Image (spheres, rainbow, N blue to C red):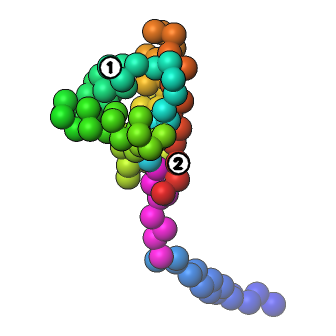
Amino acid sequence: MNSNCDVLTKVKINTEIEMPKLYSVVYFNDNKTTSLFVAQSLVDVFDHSIDAALALTESIDKNGSGVAAQDLAKEIAQHLRDLVISKARAQEFPLVVEIKEQ
């Protein structure tokens, strides 16, 4: 006996798209890293205006931390954090910069 049988497979397609997690880059105040370095790194790395960089630097000094950038993909946030830390270490500053999931 030869029987032809078609097999029907149902495939359920997941149409729900999960948005990627977003991250912020956060600077933390310390007693050794200069305000000039912090402000300059905000301008150079994050493209802040001089006025915005100075205001954020003052806020970091006053509040202990501040957000340099937000709504970033994890890899970009990590890259920017590493760039700032590398620049800080080159000048022997102990600046702490972390990424935080939003």
Q: Quadrant of the N terminus?
A: bottom right
The boundaries of the magenta stretch are 16-23
Does residue 10 appear left or right of residue 50 in this picture? right
Front-lying residue, 63 or 75: 63
Q: Residues within 10 Å of mark 1 (few under 14, many from 20)?
A: few
Residue shown at 18%/34% (left/top)? 51
Residue 36 numbered tag: 1
**Is 3 above or below relative to 29?**
below
Residue 41 visible? no
Q: Is residue 18 magenta?
A: yes
Q: Where, by quadrant of the figure, is residue 10 drawn?
A: bottom right
Q: Is residue 29 magenta?
A: no
Count of all numbered marks drawn on residues in the image: 2
The picture places residue 12, in percent across and down from the top left corner, at: 56, 81
Q: Secondary structure at mark 1?
A: helix
Residue shown at 26%/33% (left/top)? 53
**Is 49 above or below relative to 36?**
below
Q: Secondary structure at mark 2?
A: strand
Residue 60 visible? yes
Front-lying residue, 87 or 52: 52
The picture places residue 60, in percent across and down from the top left corner, at: 41, 38
Q: Amino acid at mark 1?
A: Leu
The picture places residue 74, in percent across and down from the top left corner, at: 49, 45
Residue shown at 48%/32% (left/top)? 29
